[in-house]
Image (cartoon, helix red, strand yellow):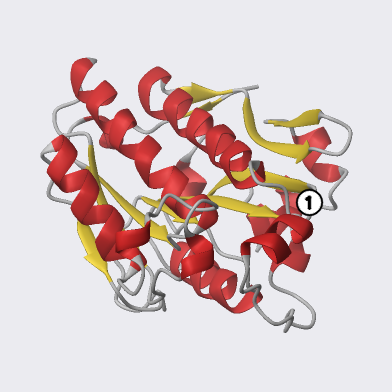
Amino acid sequence: MEHHLPSSYLDRAISVHVVGCGGTGSQILAGLARLHVTMLSLGHPAGLNVHVWDDDTVEPHNVGRQLFFQPDVGLNKAEVMVYRLNTAFGLAWEAIPERFTGEYLSDAQIIIGCVDTKSSRIAINAAVRASHHCYWLDMGNRSGDGQAILGLGGYGASRSKVPLPLPTDLLPELIEGVEDTETPTCSVRASIAKQGLFLNQQVATWGLELLFRLLTKGRLSWHGVFINTENASVTRLKVDPATWARFGYSTESAEAA
């Protein structure tokens, strides 16, 4: 079974909103610039029009673990990355140095979530469901494992012959339950002890691979991966109702809703 990209994504710039510009988000943005150039080379008329949301500033312990450098300390993360990529690739992408709320967001065709809180995912989930037709690429990780899952939402999504369940349809714990209130890590040593150095990069790479396949080949037979760096495994999430049912998701109940 395969999911196919709507033809409307092929005739104008694709509106992409990246939420979060930290460990995963900074990696994603560097890859999106390369994907944009590749799409233009393959004949897409306008590639990607990217908007980046993050109200956080670069701190000393971010240098090395995220794609920031010492002179960036104290500057807004979204503004640093967007300025750098706009200058390097001749882009006109937009940095929004604010927390993403999802309000008044009607143009999004792809939302990429690089966040680690339930409240942020709740805002993304609401924005996607209120849209016309919007893909949601959710990426997250813990100490030694992570996931990248692409779903499709919006009131026009039901027209797809093979719709993709949203990340929260398969993993409701992403937005349900008590928020993790653990104090943020403020040193490189503590960060490494909590999470491997290259886990964010691996999650971002698989997320970018999904987007590359969808936007250049126009179809997907799998729409997510689960990564475990402790046992060096990557498990794909197939476009398959039987696979989704193992997560407790039913296409029949989704259509009824």
| Residue denoted by label 1 | 249
Residue 28, x across and y down, in percent: 44, 44
In depth, the one of 243 and 73 nearer the eye is 73
In depth, the one of 172 and 86 nearer the eye is 86
Residue 11, x across and y down, in percent: 18, 32
Residue type at mark 1 is Tyr
Classed neighbour count for the residue bearing mark 1: other residues with Cα under 10 Å, few (<14), some (14–19), many (≥20): some
- Residue 3 seen in render: yes
In depth, the one of 134 and 194 nearer the eye is 194
Residue 186, x across and y down, in percent: 61, 74
The image quarter containing residue 52 is bottom left
Quadrant in which the C terminus is drawn: bottom right
The image quarter containing residue 256 is bottom right
In depth, the one of 156 and 129 nearer the eye is 129
The reply, left or right, for residue 146 in relation to residue 75 is right
Quadrant in which the N terminus is drawn: top right
